[in-house]
Every structure is written in structure tokens, then in C-alpha cells.
Image (spheres, rainbow, N blue to C red):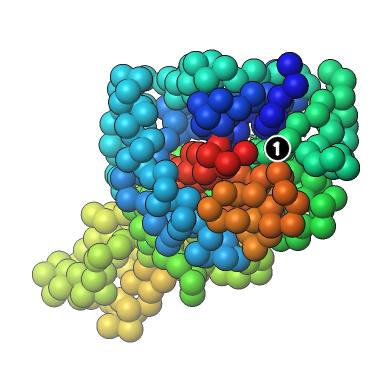
Amino acid sequence: MTPDVIIIGAGASGLMCAMEAGKRGRKVLVLDHANKAGKKILMSGGGRCNFTNLSVGAENYLSHNPHFCKSALSRFTQWDFIALVQKHRIPYHERAHGQLFCDDSAKDILNMLLAECDAAGVTIRLNTRLDAVARRPEGGFQLKTSIGNLDCQSLVIASGGLSIPTMGASPFGYRIAEQFGIQVWPTRAGLVPFTLHPPDKEKLAPLSGIAVDSVVENPRQAFRENLLFTHRGLSGPAILQISSYWQPGEAVEIDLLPGTDLAGELQRAREERPNAALKTVLSGHLPKRLIAALLDDALAEKPLQHLSRQDLLDVAAALQQWRVKPNGTEGYRTAEVTLGGVDCAAVSSKTMESRDVPGLYFVGEVLDITGWLGGYNFQWAWSSGWCAGQYA
Ligand code: FDA
């Protein structure tokens, strides 16, 4: 068959686009170089796929054009995706911050998309390499692939970002955009753990495995979530979230006791238990190993009565305004997403079609839209894929 629509990438956005275009009666072929569809869906959310969030808005996304995502998110919403999940009787549950996860397995979401594609007559070809894309003089595109030359009217780039190269990630979408004269914003890893400079790494190494509630912030954004110390550096949801807003060389400020007036509590404790050692009082708030790593031993051993008001303020600042300057991030090897990408200004926010190249569409993470942790990236994949599926 000669397809009407070829979609590059059998991931979240590509499969959503495929099933929608197929439902419109379009002949749809999805090509992927990986040996399996939806690999990132399968590994997402610790195998349970955080497929959307109860509260989704433009403020949950980063982009050079912060308004671009609004149209698609309002045309195919989290409620539309939840309805699909319910139609397929997939059991799910809500976790903190409105995040929705499968009860059983991320496989349920992938199987749902594959079943919808199948019902809409979509063909999926895996293990297929793309060598070149060209515009046909009569309109549409010709693709040189490892299964031969293929023609189509509409070409949808759903090839994702650069994170986790071992899962099939490639810069293909960016190269296609550049080939057609479309700007690509510089890319970098997002939702990614921080690595530390050697002295900090050494100091914090004994804390590996400890997780604490925290507020992590920089001048542009703040997140209250868990922070996890690892043997490589800092991770956990709070760090992943702020990493998307972090610029190399910058420090982040960490409050390890959010919502607590630690200085006030220490002053009260000094009146009530003057002989208690500082570390004893603090151990009611934080793990002992953490106190030992962040405070000087001699200071931590002192009875509260030997500490001045200023000393207590300094202790509170050390634990509630702890400044850490990351060495870098773990990069695409472990990042959940890619920041930057295909310039939204070159694409219609309603159809996802290129403004200058008729028939060429971009959906999902390849675009310069990056969501927070919490199901927002999949929701963008569903919403943008759905929109393109109405027009491609
Ligand atoms: P996606 O990456 O899903 O698909 C792209 C497809 O294109 C892949 O199948 C790839 O093989 C194919 N491809 C690439 N280059 C190609 C080429 N040259 N030729 C042919 N095919 C090519 N988000 C969320 O909302 N909730 C979550 O729980 C998680 N969890 C999570 C965990 C981990 C470990 C990662 C890495 C990421 C997440 N994410 C997430 C992010 C989410 O997975 C991601 O944003 C979406 O999968 C993006 O969907 P796309 O369709 O754009 O790309």
C-alpha cells in the first residue's frame, strides 16, 4: 500500500497521532528503527507509567514560546486521555501532586495505543532505518529507508528527544527540521540528577540512599518534593524538577526542613533543654548522617547553652538555605527528557504542521516543549499527537 501518512517514531506521540489519523480513514504507516514500539512508555514511571496529571497547564511546561502548548493541551486534555484509559478498563491510581499511574503495568498503556492503532488500520514497521527524506515536486515526501523508497502526502516527525540513547533516542527529528530550514533550539538534558564537584561528592557520599522532604530553588523556580542523595550526587523529584531550570555554573538553594522555623525551634529548645547537644535536638528533625555531613563535628556536639543566637541562626541557614553548586548533570544517559528542540514558531499550534513546509508535522518531545515531572511529558505527547492526527 502507498500510505497517506508516514509517522517516524512508534513512541507516545507517534502512536497517538497514528490512531487518530487512522480513524479519519487515512492510510497510516509508522516507522521506527527500534525493535519494539513504545520503549519509553514501558520504562516510564518505574514501570507503571505516570501517564498524565489531574492538573495540567502551560505553567507546567518550559519552552521558548510558553504559550504554544496551550491550544493542544486544551483540545486534547488529560480528561480525554483518562477517558481512553477508562474505556480500556485500565486500573490506575492517583499519587501526590495529581499524578496518575497504572495500578499494574505501563504495558497496559502501550497495549491500549497498539489496540487503537490496530482498530484504525495503522501499519507499524519496526527495525526500519531512515536514510533520507526529500520533498516530491508534485507535493508530499519521498523517504529512502532500509525497506525501500516510500512516498507519502504527510510526514509526521515523532522521533522524540535525546534522552536514553540505548532506548532508541536519536537526533533524527532535529536533523530533518534543519534540512527544511527550521530552527532548532540548542538541546540539553532535563529532569536529570546533578553530579557534584569532588569535595561535595566526598562529603555527601556517606548519605547515599537518604531521602528527605525539601524545597529546592533557584531564582526562577522552586519545587517542594523529595531529595535523594545518591553515590553520584543529588537526585529525587525535587532535583529532577529544578534541573530543567538550572544553568551550568549556578547554585541551587535547598531547604531541608520546609515549613519549619528551625531557628525559632532551636531557641526554644535552648531554653527548655540547655544541656542537650545541638545534634541531639536536630536528630528529631533530620537523619543523623545528614547532620554529621552538613555541620562541623565540634559545633554539632556543643550543648545548646553554649551557642549564641547568631550560632543558631547560622545552623538554621546551613540546613534551610543550603547552597550547592552542581558540577553538572548525569546527561542524556539518565535524563527523562530533552530541553530545547524544534522551534515552535515554525509550527502551527493548532495542527502541528510546519508553517513553511506543507505536509510536514512535528509532535511530542522533538518540539521545544518540555514538561515537569508528573505525567506532563506524556500529556504533551498525547495532546500534540492527537492534534496532528486530525490534520495529517
Ligand atoms: P518517544 O521517545 O516516546 O518516541 C520516539 C520514538 O522514535 C522511539 O520509539 C524511537 O525509537 C523512535 N526514533 C528515534 N529516532 C528514530 C529514527 N532515526 N528512525 C526511526 N525511529 C526513530 N513522562 C511522563 O509524562 N511520565 C513518566 O512517567 C515518564 N517517565 C519516564 C521515564 C524515563 C526513564 C524516561 C527516559 C522518560 C520518561 N518520561 C515520562 C518522558 C516520556 O517518556 C517522553 O517525554 C515521551 O515518551 C515523549 O514521547 P515522544 O513520542 O515524543 O518520543
Which is more toward the observer, 319 or 225? 225
Q: In which image quadrant can residue 217 be found?
A: bottom left
Above/below status of 363 relative to 67? above
Tell me if 53 is positioned left or right of 389 in this view: left
Residue 151, compared with residue 387, is above or below; it is above
Name the residue furthest front. 138
At which x and y percent is residue 332? 68, 44
Residue 240 visible in rendering = no
Q: Residue furthest left?
A: 272
Whether residue 382 is situated above or below residue 327 in the rendered picture: above
Closer-to-camera residue (285/242): 242
Residue 137 visible at all: yes
Specify the quadrant of the image occupied by residue 278: bottom left
Q: Point out residue 302 in the picture as x, y percentages from the top left corner.
A: 32, 68
Q: Residues within 10 Å of mark 1 (few under 14, many from 20)?
A: many
Q: Secondary structure at mark 1?
A: strand
Residue drawn at point x = 81 percent, y = 37 percent: 141
**Residue in the picture at 56% in, 31% down:** 21
Q: Is residue 135 left or right of residue 282?
A: right
Residue 177 on image: x %, y % = 77, 50
Left or right of 326: which side holds 162?
Answer: right
Up the image or down, 47 lies above or below 285; here it is: above
Picture residue at 42% right of the left edge, 27% below the top: 48
- Ligand 1 visible in quadrant: top right
- Residue at 82%, 25% in the rendered image: 150
Residue 203 percent across, percent down from the top left = 55, 55
Inspect the image, locate mark 1, and give the three-letter code of the amino acid beneath it.
Ser
| Quarter of the figure with the C terminus | top right
Q: Which residue is mark 1?
A: 154
- In the picture, the quarter occupied by the N terminus is top right
Query: Is 391 or 220 nearer to us in this picture?
Result: 391
